[in-house]
Image (tube, rainbow, N blue to C red):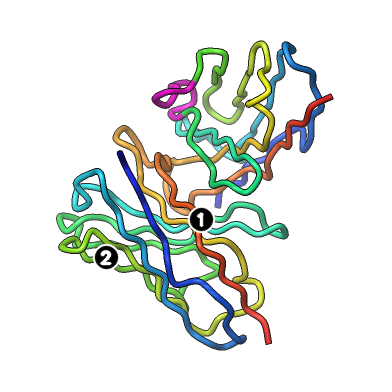
């Protein structure tokens, strides 16, 4: 059974930093692109970042809204993906989901339960 | 970026009815379209990918269709467990974008 478990969310002040973690199980982690997606009442579902495989030199892609502030990374030895978030803004508030791409395309086949990030003074 | 426009934003229907949700892409995305279901307080779950392929375990009353810029999700004979929110998303390439969602409620 595929499982994705996020951690690291909480309350942070504007301008602050936070690192989210996601531990995966139930599949060969090193074979799959991983993504972070966030959700807020104001913006709905928003794709945040993607990291590809070692064979792709761990290529990363970001939404324009987080480029330069967020960094996605992975540790295949720990079956984990991370999202380092710096210079956080109120509009970054939301539930952050760790997701795994599918076997037949870049759709998001599996989602974690999410971790809530609140950016507020 | 590709914009995804989903309609209707909300829909009220009764158990046993058939409903259709539509999604339009701002440019050609071929068949790179997915649909997700989200129930209150839960994370989204994949229903359909590549426009018409049902994800594992999804009941056959769900069906996806379309290509290019026009897509739809049809639910035949609505069941109580089908009520919730539905989202389309293109997976043609980054940035992946989602539709605004359709909230399906019990009439």
Q: Residue at x 17, y 59 (%)?
A: A54
Q: Mark 1 highlights which residue? A: A47
**Quarter of the image where one finds residue A23:** bottom left
Please identify the quadrant where the C terminus of chain A is shown: bottom right
Q: Residue at x 61, y 38 (%)?
A: B87
Cβ–Cβ under 8 Å for marks 1 and 2: no
Q: Mark 2 highlights which residue? A: A74
Asked whether residue A93 is drawn in magenta, I would say no
Q: Earlier in the sequence, mark 1 or mark 2?
A: 1
1 vs 2, front mark: 2
**Quarter of the image where one finds residue A82:** bottom left
SS class of the residue under badge 2?
strand
Q: Nearer the viewer, residue A36 or A60?
A: A36
- What range of the chain is rendered magenta? B49-58
| Mark 1 on the same chain as mark 2 | yes
Instruction: Provide the chain ID for the residue under circle 1.
Output: A
As drawn, A50 above or below A15:
above
Q: Nearer the viewer, residue B15 or A45?
A: B15
Residue B69, horizontal then vertical, whole percent: 58, 31
């Amino acid at each position: 059974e595929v499982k994705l478990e996020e951690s690291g969310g909480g309350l942070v002040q504007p301008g602050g930093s936070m690192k989210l973690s996601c531990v995966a199980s139930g599949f060969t982690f090193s074979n799959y692109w991983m993504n972070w997606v966030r959700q807020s009442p104001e913006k709905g579902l928003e794709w945040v970042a993607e990291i590809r495989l070692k064979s792709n030199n761990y290529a990363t892609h970001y939404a324009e809204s987080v480029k330069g502030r967020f960094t996605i990374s992975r540790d295949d030895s720990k079956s984990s993906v991370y999202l380092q978030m710096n210079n956080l803004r109120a509009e970054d508030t939301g539930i952050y989901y760790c997701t795994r791409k599918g076997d037949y395309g870049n759709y998001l086949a599996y989602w974690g339960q999410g971790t809530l990030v609140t950016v507020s003074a | 970026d590709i914009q995804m426009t989903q309609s209707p934003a909300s829909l009220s229907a009764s158990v046993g009815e058939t409903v259709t949700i539509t999604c339009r892409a701002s440019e050609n995305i071929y068949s790179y379209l997915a649909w997700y279901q989200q129930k209150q307080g839960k994370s989204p779950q994949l229903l359909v990918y590549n426009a018409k392929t049902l994800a594992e375990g999804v009941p056959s009353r769900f069906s996806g269709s379309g290509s290019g810029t026009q897509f739809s999700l049809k639910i035949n004979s609505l069941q109580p467990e089908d009520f919730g929110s539905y989202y389309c998303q293109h997976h043609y390439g980054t940035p992946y974008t989602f539709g605004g969602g359709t909230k399906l409620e019990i009439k």
